[in-house]
Amino acid sequence: MDAIEILKQLKDQGVRFTPQRQAILEYLLETKTHPTAEEVYHHVKAKFPGVSLGTIYNTLNMLKEHGYILELSYGDMSSRFDGNAKNHYHVVCLNCGKVVDFHRPLIEMESEVAEKFGFEITGERLEFYGICPDCRRKN
Ligand code: ZN
Ligand code: MN
């Protein structure tokens, strides 16, 4: 889904969008880096110097609550935000915090879990942890 479509859907639900909020959404949809709120702030600030960190946080929360983005939390590391809310998985570097997408359908595992535990499965979170090639080279 692109920014225009999301803006339209949210407008139908009475959510007001300023140019700043739109820039936050567009950045999340285009980037593959899974930025922290701080990183979103620095990116949007380049174009909108008046934007506040509060606007970043409440826009991220609003988009998350409406299911358009994901928040990936990692214990003591800052949460990362993902403009792709569809099912996919992540490979995370424990050294630098880099988060990389991994796309592979896990439908078989999902139905196995549903059957074994009698759950209706509505989502899943699968992550691989390790040390990325950049960090391995430095060590
Ligand atoms: Zn790394
Ligand atoms: Mn992702």
Image (tube, rainbow, N blue to C red):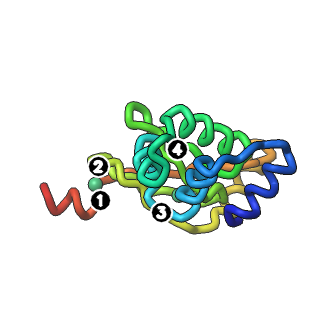
Is 42 situated left or right of 120 in this image?
Answer: left
**Placement of 135 over or under 80, stated as above or below:** below
The three-letter code of the residue at mark 1 reads Cys
Would the CB of label 1 be found within 8 Å of ligand 1?
yes
**Residue extending furthest toward the left:** 139
Would the CB of label 4 be found within 8 Å of ligand 2?
yes
Mark closest to the chain's N terminus, 4 or 2: 4
Would the CB of label 3 be found within 8 Å of ligand 2?
yes
| Rendered residue at 54%/64% (across/down) | 30
| Rendered residue at 58%/61% (across/down) | 29
| Rendered residue at 47%/63% (across/down) | 32
Residue under pointer 3: 32
Is 1 situated left or right of 131 in this image?
Answer: right
The three-letter code of the residue at mark 3 reads Lys
Mark closest to the chain's N terminus, 2 or 3: 3
The Cα–Cα distance between marks 2 and 3, rounded to whole angstroms, is 16 Å
Would the CB of label 2 be found within 8 Å of ligand 1?
yes
Of badges 1 and 4, nearer the viewer stands 4
Mark closest to the chain's N terminus, 1 or 4: 4
| Rendered residue at 79%/49% (across/down) | 10
Question: If the picture is divided into quarters, which one holds ligand 1?
Answer: bottom left
The three-letter code of the residue at mark 2 reads Cys
Residue under pointer 2: 96
The mark found on residue 132 in the picture is 1
